Amino acid sequence: MRHSTQLLGAVSALALVAMSSSPALAVGTTAGDTITNSVTVSYQVGNDPNTQQDVTDSDTFTVDRRIDVNVNLTSTSPVTVSPGEVQAVLAFDVTNLSNDTVDLDLSAVLVGGTAANIENITIYRDLNGDGALQQAEIDAGAITFLDEVAADDGTGTETIEVLVVADITTDAVNSDTFDLVLVADAHEAGAAGLGAEINATSGANTSGVDTVLADQSGTAEEAVGDGAHSDQGQFSVAGAVVTVVKSSRIVSDPVNGATNPKAIPGATIEYCIAVTNAAGAADATAVTVNDDLPADVTFTPGSGIIVNGTATIDSSGPTPVATCSGGTDEEGGDASFTAGGGTGGLDLISGNLADIPANTTSSVYFEVTIN
């Protein structure tokens, strides 16, 4: 400390002048900045202004590094997917809350669900921030880290949007779930590629730039104060759950006609095939019905094959019974008869149904004659 060399008597006045320091950023002063605090003490001796003296001193210290990372899922979780779906997406924001530039090592970890039923887990930059995978992101290529992520200065450049993308296999079934965690771990910036992992400075404060790890914990994949943070999203499989009921009814016979007909040779039989997609399931698409006719019945080409009908199912008895109605005759279009086209050379009836939503039944029905 510097003192005046002239001391003329008792101090008559003291004044402390305001401190000065480097300006702060919007969120935190940058690591490595120096903060200087200066003080001035003024006094007189015997209230004589001619004896006015000033003494000053200052203190300077270096701002240390506060490392803090945040990962935040931005998709509405769970994200509904279908068996066989490719490039399903979970969107995340990754933010550098530190007061220094960092690299961020990224990893996507499957923490729940059958690993065999999810594959090709990949991370991409979300270049336009729309939360969806576009061709531009695919062309840019998958990433494993974020390079030179700016310090948190309130401008928004410290937040990077990323996409965790995965394929759901066809073995996944309705109500399967897959829990994925995105972890961002702070690494040293300033060099090509991913820098070394950042560690906290141990022991007492030094005169240089020390490091404090101030991150919180998002999931069990990382811990408080380890330089990493994470968040979790979920894929939920909504598969089609399809059941089929096939029933027959006697329409008429050669003796009784339509009054109390019996299943005798020459009788007309209606086959009803009811296809039901369960409540809560995804739409059943590309539904095709293939029916091998028994050798003891004959279908008359041109007699009609009705598709996209409705059906009621009576489950009160030991065996469910379906009754078909409505629909459109699509023989020669979405429905066909192929003589000898079935298993073992049996005749084949085929019909293509429109997509079947959840909790909906559609049907195919036609008539045959008993040989």
Image: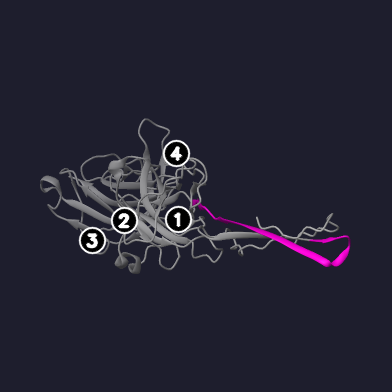
Q: Which mark is residue 220?
A: 4
Who comes first in sequence, dot 3 or dot 1? 1
Q: Is residue 126 left or right of residue 352?
A: right
Rendered-image quadrant of the C terminus: top left
Find disc 3 in the rendering and name its residue. Answer: 302
Looking at the rendered image, the quarter that the N terminus falls into is: bottom right
Residue 98 picture location, percent across and down:
50, 55
Local SS, label 3: loop
Q: Secondary structure at mark 2?
A: loop
Do callouts 1 and 4 mark residues in contact (Cβ within 8 Å)? Answer: no
- Mark nearest the camera among 1 and 4 is 4
Q: Which residue is mark 1?
A: 92
Q: Is residue 50 visible?
A: yes
The residue range painted magenta reads 43-69
Q: CA distance from mark 2 to mark 4?
A: 28 Å
Q: Give the number of the mark in front: 3 or 4.
A: 4
Q: CA distance from mark 3 to mark 4?
A: 66 Å
The residues bearing labels 1 and 4 have C-alpha atoms spaced at a distance of 17 Å
Give how far apart the Cα atoms at labels 2 and 3 are. 42 Å
Which comes before the other along the chain, label 1 or label 2?
Answer: 2
Q: Residue furthest top?
A: 318
Amino acid identity at mark 1: Phe
Give the mark nearest the N terminus, 3 or 4: 4
* Residue bearing mark 2: 86
Which is nearer the eye, 351 or 305?
351
Mark 2 or mark 4: which is in front? 4
Tell me which residue sits at (35%, 47%) in the image.
Answer: 274
Residue 221 highlighted magenta (yes or no): no
Q: Is 272 above or below relative to 129?
A: above
